[in-house]
Image: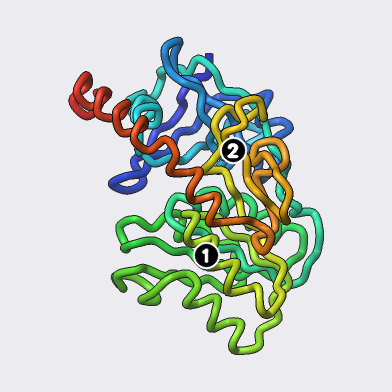
Amino acid sequence: MYKILEKKVLNPVTKMNVIAAPDIAKVCKPGQFVMIRVNETGERFPLTIADFDRKKGTITIVYQEVGKSTKLLGSMEKGESLLDFIGPLGKPSPTDKVYGTVVAIGGGCGSAIVYPVARAFKESGNKLITINGARSMDLLLYQDEMEAISDESYITTDDGTCGVHGFVTTVLGELIQQGRQIDLVFAVGPVPMMKFVSKTTEAPKIHTLVSLNSIMVDGTGMCGACRVTVGGQMKFACVDGPEFDGHQVDFNELMGRLNAYVDYEKVSDEAWEKAHGGGK
């Protein structure tokens, strides 16, 4: 059993838990994920590690309550325990290399995933530029944390309530047009965002990595649900990734596959809401 040591509501749709998991905290690296099962009747689902503390033996997870399983997780309180918490899984981010200038981009909940990776890029000696985006100011995550580790830090909101009025690609495009030296772009967020980040960097040939964690299901490659086409070859996001060259990902196929079970997810979510009245 894995005890919840801390619980926070980060914004209207996002929560954060700190979990006691010393064995995972000892060996995990930025970019890896864990598989969670709240209780015996719950399904297994993956969440990327948002932070870790090796001394305290803790793992931090950040998630949006978008369906039955994440709402069940969100209903758990400090002091309660999760049944399964397995990891670390997936290949770690390539943060031990000095690239030069790295632009780390987070969109929505993706900012929580980007943070430990961006921090590791900085600790390896890279110049770090961060772009943190959300639909509106109240949905921004990790503003202070990202700014603290950055050489340059930008915020964008779709509605203009904070920072630059526009998308993360608005700032990224401006940096490229200014002729800034950019050696690597690392982006995590909604699939359309990662698609357009990759399109923005394609012509100038800036190496771009994206995390396809949102399509993962069982985390071991056995279910086959996370199949993606990368460079014309089939890959599994969970065991071959979750990070891939954004210029090689077939994003149109990816978005189609992400929508394959929307109707079933809706039925499950509605049943949860009916049974629990929105959670406990």
Element at label 1: helix
Residue 262 horizontal/vertical position (percent): 37, 38
Q: Quadrant of the C terminus?
A: top left
Label 2 amino acid? Answer: Cys
Label 1 amino acid? Answer: Glu
Label 2 sits on residue: 226
Residue positioned 47% across, 59% down in the render: 192
- For residue 84, the mark is none
Q: Is residue 256 above or below residue 261?
A: below
Residue furthest right as drawn: 97
Query: Which one is nearer the viewer's eye here, 61 or 188?
Result: 188
The answer to which quarter of the image holds residue 250 is bottom right
Residue positioned 70% across, 41% down in the render: 29
Label 1 sits on residue: 147
Q: Is residue 237 above or below residue 21?
A: below
Residue positioned 53% across, 71% down in the render: 153
Query: Which one is nearer the viewer's eye here, 274 or 139?
Result: 274
Residue furthest top as drawn: 40
